Image (cartoon, helix red, strand yellow):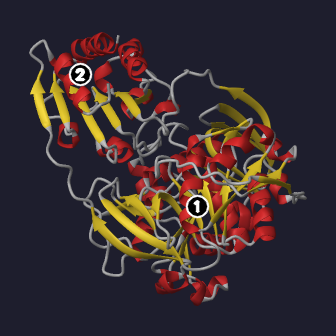
Amino acid sequence: MTEILVLVDHVDGAVRKPTLELLTIARRLGQPSAVFLGAGVADATETLARFGAAKVYVVEAPELDKYLVAPKAEALAAVAAQASPAAILVTSHAEGKEIAARVAVKLGSGIITDAVDVDADGVASQSVFAGSFLVTSKVTHGAPVIAVKPNAAAPQESPAAAAVETVAVTFSEAATKAEITAVAPRAKSGRPELTEAAIVVSGGRGVGGAEGFGVLEALADALGAAVGASRAATDAGWYPHAFQVGQTGKTVSPQLYIANGISGAIQHRAGMQTSKTIVAVNKDAEAPIFELADYGVVGDLFNVVPQLTEEIGRRTS
Amino acid sequence: MKIVVLVKHVPDAASDRSFAADLTVDRAAVDGRLSELDEYAVEQALQLVEKAGEGEITFLTMGPEGAGEALRKALSMGGDAAVHVVDDALHGSDALATSLVLAKALGKLEWDLVVCGMSSTDAWMSVVPAMLSERLGVAGLTLASELTVDGGTVTIRRDGDDASTTVTAALPALVSVTDQTGEARYPSFKGIMAAKKKPVTTYTLADLGVDSGSVGLGGAWSAVDAAAKRPPRAAGVVVSDEGDGGVKLAEFLATGKFI
């Protein structure tokens, strides 16, 4: 059966949800094999088996953590050279897209990034021009390398063997030039990953300051949501840049997006307008965000949001 | 220190962008501009030369005739010279072909450092810097929020989701910079006048030794089947907060089974 390689996105063996989505999509194209780079495969195989990985190729080498991105691309290309897959799927985030780019050059394959869906014929859908167009395209040369955005599919279980196969890779001099000399981990918020969350509560200029995000965090915690911010809020230093939703930040596509004090400039809309349901709270009735909203409240977020949080608490207790 | 900054002329993101009949981005229908994210790359290169007290900056672009406008804009901000790869056969090139042509053009130039923006503001793929690093066989230090060069070493800070990482490499190297590196300067009147006198060299595919069959729409390794305007979202309900806005919102969320 046609083999499809899925690059596993994991943190020390804990498999991230977008990988399960990739395995689900890969089954439309053929039989998925997972490619696991780094340490911790023992913690990942049960999950990878449950979601349909027939094989798990493992590359474990110090170079993968010591140098930036390039060794991971070299390892994935080495597995591809051995497996001759019909397609390669990676998560479409910053590192995934870079790996895809390098692998496409190495293998002489066409590449598609930012796919929001891939069908059984390998036709990928993309949302472009700030979400105003939907484009479908297909790789026409080599084994397609496709970077798929989080939330492109609902993960479905389909038990498979997940037979582990270790692959030895010799890294080139070119791949070991950009050396990682320090890593400062970020403090964990304990909330879901922004791009993976089912619900996102976001704040913008109307939040007024860093302390204002407290009411949004309280709402997020009541809903089990992630917290996001517009560029106006992150540029002002009110919330960390890593949580920026928009063109130069994260693109999110949750079931529910609650925009608070966000006017809805194109730069922000591009990052959130494919959300299933959009709610907006804003003082300004003319704010363009209301054009996107399924439900909007014209009012002061500092009155509306705490009342909403309290009401959720009342209904769920 | 010799620096090449890659720049792209893109359709203005604030305009009504669309596709041409051949399903390539319609670059004629709307105004173009130097990609906003490339301005950060220009700024970082200018700052590196200012700090070092020496250095030469060349701007490089690939694109139709009108793309020269992006080079002029960059030159009005500073720098010394520009190179424009222009050839009708390039129309419709994919990222792989773009990186191939830019790599060939970089092969004709002298440089210690290549600086790129984090992404173009039309295609948003963010893959060309990685492809170029791969093709050139030099270190790729991507998505820098901060960039320094000390002697023959380049160091960046890359702010990821889980960690902030310091990455270092010996020159020659390629760096891509984010919009967190600091606002780009506006061209001065003097800068705009000076830009008119700075040399712009043009290269064709023949000059670079690139076969026209390996680029353009025909040489692309992916093909667009269709591009359709997304239907506007159905109009929703907007209420004014009369003191019960939060409760009403909770009712809406309960109807949608979110709570």
Three-letter code for the amino acid on which mark 1 is drawn: Ala
Q: Position of residue A195 (x, y in %)?
A: 48, 39
Residue A218: quarter of image: top left
Report whether residue B18 is seen: no
In which chain is the residue bearing label 1?
A
**Left or right position of A273 against A164:** left
> Is the residue at mark 1 from the same chain as the one at mark 2?
no
Three-letter code for the amino acid on which mark 2 is drawn: Ala
How would you rate the neighbour count of disc 1 (Cα within 10 Å): few for under 14, some for 14-19, many for 20 or more?
many
Task: Say which element carries label 1.
Answer: helix
How would you rate the neighbour count of disc 2 (Cα within 10 Å): few for under 14, some for 14-19, many for 20 or more?
many
Picture quarter with the C terminus of chain B? top left
Q: Nearer the viewer, residue A311 or B235?
A: A311
**Left or right position of A290 against B30:** left
Q: CA distance from mark 1 to mark 2?
A: 38 Å
Q: Position of residue B175 (x, y in %)?
A: 66, 50
Task: Say which element carries label 2.
Answer: helix
In which chain is the residue bearing label 2?
B
Q: Image point 26% across, 58% down: which residue?
A: B15
Seen in the picture, residue A148 relative to A206 is either above or below; the reply is below
Q: Which residue is mark 2?
A: B250
Q: Which residue is mark 1?
A: A26
